[in-house]
Amino acid sequence: MAKVLAAVRTGPSKTEIREFPMPEVPADSALMKMEVAGICGTDVKLYKTPPSAAPVIMGHENIGVIAKAGSEFVRRKGFKEGDLVFVEHYVMCGKCEWCHAGQYRHCENTDWRNNPEGIRYGYTSAERAPHLWGGFAQYVYLPWNAVVHQVPKGVSAELAGLVTPMANGVEWSLFDGGVGYNSTVLIQGPGQQGLSQTVICKQAGASLIIVTGTSKDAARLKVAKELGADHVIDVQKEDPLQRIKQVTGGKGVDVVLDCTAGAGTIPILLGVEAMKRKVKAITIKSARGHSYKACELALAQLASKRFPLEKVTTHRFGLKDVDMAIKSVGGHGVPDVIHASLMPWL
């Protein structure tokens, strides 16, 4: 029987390469041959401090080619063998109120924290058949309720690996933050999330974009400028609030997007102080994940080639290098990694 290789998280900061059986593919399901699994800050946290002892194939930013598709899957989804696709990490139930409202990211079926039966790519136990629930593997299993998007022609698998942070950029800055024409924006944190917000805000017509980071973010702050940031601030070298007041003529900004590793802690205090005041009327929102529409807009943005986003996809790693790849994204390995592409066949 054919086997599938996968990198499995077996404990805190521990990975093993394991073999799994090639799954049977029912009529309503498919099998995706992995091309690129993006690695983000969430992976860094979950790798260092796993939420459970269960073995997990991580990888929730997944791009691949439909290798085998059942007839019912093709009929329902519209995808066929050979298509390059992006698979969201949410595996919805398709019948609850959230799913019917198109807000499947809130569906209980995706809630890996509280629902032992929940399925989410990169989070679900590898002990659950058919095991292939993460992108750090040669193949990923797609059930009937997987959420799949076509990767536009001309977009490489590596570039498409940015779609998740780009979709978060659309959801958080445009849909949740209301950024639009002539907006002034402060983006805290120049990682892949913050850089994606920079691109989306620029595309939306923001007239002023300020990105903050620390001294170790020097390379990322340089990329932020190349992607359209008007000002970048090293908060360890200058007073960020004073500089923000200076570049805004003392007014402050319309929207603050906290994309730091410690989101919601110290940076939120700076964010509040940096905002324009209307008798201290400030709205604070907790942004979570992305919607279907945000993913489609993110894919269209990648296809437009309007921004040099190849500057964000900085490093490639093979399956045996998962440990180094995750640690490098967290700043403790290969230097100056922004977005790491895990390529299982490399």
Image (tube, rainbow, N blue to C red):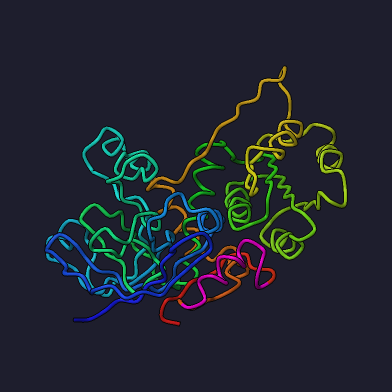
Please, is residue 262 above or below residue 215 in the view? above
Residue 20, horizontal then vertical, whole percent:
28, 73
Residue 277, horizontal then vertical, whole percent:
73, 24
Q: Nearer the viewer, residue 236 or 69?
A: 236
- Prevailing secondary structure of the magenta residues: helix
Q: Picture quarter containing residue 151? A: bottom left
Query: Can you say which quadrant of the picture contains the N terminus?
Result: bottom left
What residue appears at the point 80 percent right and 51 percent down from the top-left corner? Answer: 233
Q: Picture quarter containing residue 153? A: bottom left
Please, is residue 226 above or below residue 181 in the view? below
Q: Farthest residue to the top: give it.
A: 279
Please, is residue 195 above or below residue 291 in the view? below
Query: Can you say which quadrant of the picture contains the C terminus?
Result: bottom left
Residue 278, horizontal then vertical, whole percent:
71, 21
What residue appears at the point 76 percent right and 31 percent down from the top-left corner? Answer: 273
Judged left or right of residue 148, residue 301 is right
Q: Which residues are magenta?
A: 320-334
Is residue 257 found inside the magenta-colored segment of the image?
no
What residue appears at the point 62 percent right and 61 percent down from the top-left corner? Answer: 330
Judged left or right of residue 6, residue 251 is right
Q: Nearer the viewer, residue 248 or 142?
A: 142
Q: What count of labels does the image hold? A: 0
Residue 76, horizontal then vertical, whole percent:
17, 56
Q: Nearer the viewer, residue 163 or 308?
A: 163
What residue appears at the point 27 percent right and 75 percent down from the top-left corner? Answer: 82
Is residue 321 found inside the magenta-colored segment of the image?
yes
